[in-house]
Amino acid sequence: MTGPTIVELDEYAARRARLMQAMGPDGIAIIPAAREVIRNRDVHFKFRQDSDFTYLTGFPEPDAIAVLAPGRPEGEYLLFVRPKDPTREMWDGYRAGPDGAKRQYRAEQAQEISQFAAMLPSLLGGRARIFYTLGEHALDPQITGCVREIREISRRGASAPVEFVALETTLHEQRLLKTAAELELMAHAGKVSARAHVRAMKFAKPGVQEYQLAAEIHHEFALEGLEPGYGSIVGTGANACVLHYVENNCALKDGDLVLIDAGGEYRGYTADITRCFPANGKFSGPQKAVYDVVLAAQLAATAELKPGNPSSRPHEVATRVLTEGMVALGLLKGDIATLIKEEQHRRFFMHGTGHWLGMDVHDVGRYKVGGEARPFVPGMVMTVEPGLYIAPGSAGVDERFWGIGVRIEDDVVVTESAPRVLTGDVPKATAEIEALMKK
Ligand code: GLY
Ligand code: MN
Ligand code: MN
């Protein structure tokens, strides 16, 4: 692998310290690892660690629980992990075990996972707030059951935890602002993913299958140790108008426009790129007309990712440029402001213009605070991905536009100065795409 290395142990420690600071001395956080999921009979889906858990621990195994208990004399950072097991390790691979959790991952205390239930009452006792996201984990009944027991005892004098707090306002606010190390990983994911899109564009021609383009993309990811960060979308022709099209089983036809939405995940951080290009290497007149409207909207929206601007601004700007374009193309008729107010644009542009990006493709972090769109701050990363989708048979629309679907998506970092595009290595101007495909 040629990319940047993993996040350093010091950074995990700093993240835990920040979270504990935000929780306060009478809080406790319980963060379960992801679980293995059966694919079929004895076969599991490839394991992917929970993003919150990775963010705080770097610990890569399933069946683990992290506990952060500020001020706890026996240790503020506990890891409950799978036991060492020579037989299982012979079949399934290395386990750190409690000793490894301390030695390799700096847990101050580590226990086998089977000890969690027994230790929970003493961990929760005297804590006023439990930072734990209810409704997401199999652990819920154990935690709520323990709280109930403590409550019963508290009637006889002990104090009870009083509040469950979801992680949105603490941990997810932290994850929203990327550190330098995180941005380095994301830049690498963006670079490799851009290269993968270039490779697919060069490979494309009429007769090639959508899954073959996906294979080109995934090969480029794999060469650098990346995996798809989400299900890759390769839609040729009207398939591009299906927003979450993942069948990827049609052949490219001469005259089709092809949409690829694919991003590689590198050491837990994903890119998210969409590009559209003509199967035969040359945009038709109507394809170019639609494409250029989307590109204008994408460029205008990207320029709005500046500190202080509300995070809703890119969508407002994209919506305006797209609506003006839709009127110019004859897709919509009427006054621009009225069309937007009545949300008529949603007939052809039915999704948002971007989302936070990071460990999760639709990353954590609130979009509104106190009912208002929050202002951009350096370190936030957002996608910019306007699109137009003109389904076949769209009533009242010139048939030349039927079946054209265009989305253009880049990953953009808010900085003190100009927005930093992490995915700029794959071209998006029509002339550049045509030149690339000619080679
Ligand atoms: N690839 C998912 C998205 O663009 O939101
Ligand atoms: Mn996206
Ligand atoms: Mn995407």
Image (cartoon, helix red, strand yellow):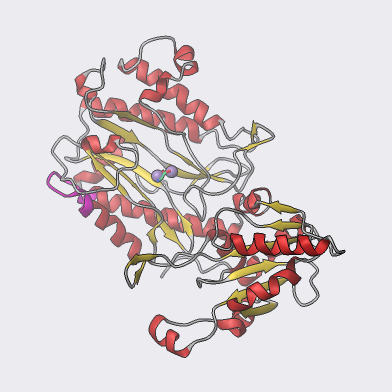
User: In this picture, is 246 found above or below 64?
Assistant: above
> Looking at this view, is 187 or 366 the one in front?
366
> Looking at this view, is 31 or 171 the one in front?
31
Residue 217: image x %, image y %? 30, 55
Q: Give the range drawn in magenta.
A: 202-212
Residue 275: image x %, image y %? 33, 42
358 displayed left or right of 245: right
Residue 213 is inside the magenta segment: no
Quadrant containing the N terminus is bottom left
Q: Which residue lies furthest to the bottom in this view?
A: 86
| Quarter residue 400 falls in | top left
At x 58% / y 63%, what residue is drawn?
Answer: 139
Residue 418: image x %, image y %? 56, 40
Residue 429: image x %, image y %? 33, 36
Q: Which residue lies furthest to the top in this view?
A: 334
| Quarter residue 23 falls in | bottom right
Quadrant hosting ligand 2: top left
> Looking at this view, is 100 or 195 the one in front?
100
| Quarter residue 293 falls in | top left
> Looking at this view, is 280 or 385 the one in front?
385
251 displayed left or right of 380: left
Q: How many marks?
A: 0
At x 55% / y 55%, what residue is drawn?
Answer: 136
User: In this picture, is 403 found above or below 229?
Assistant: above
At x 25% / y 18%, what residue is drawn?
Answer: 395
At x 50% / y 30%, what residue is drawn?
Answer: 315
User: In this picture, is 190 found above or below 296?
Assistant: below
User: In this picture, is 180 found above or below 306?
Assistant: below
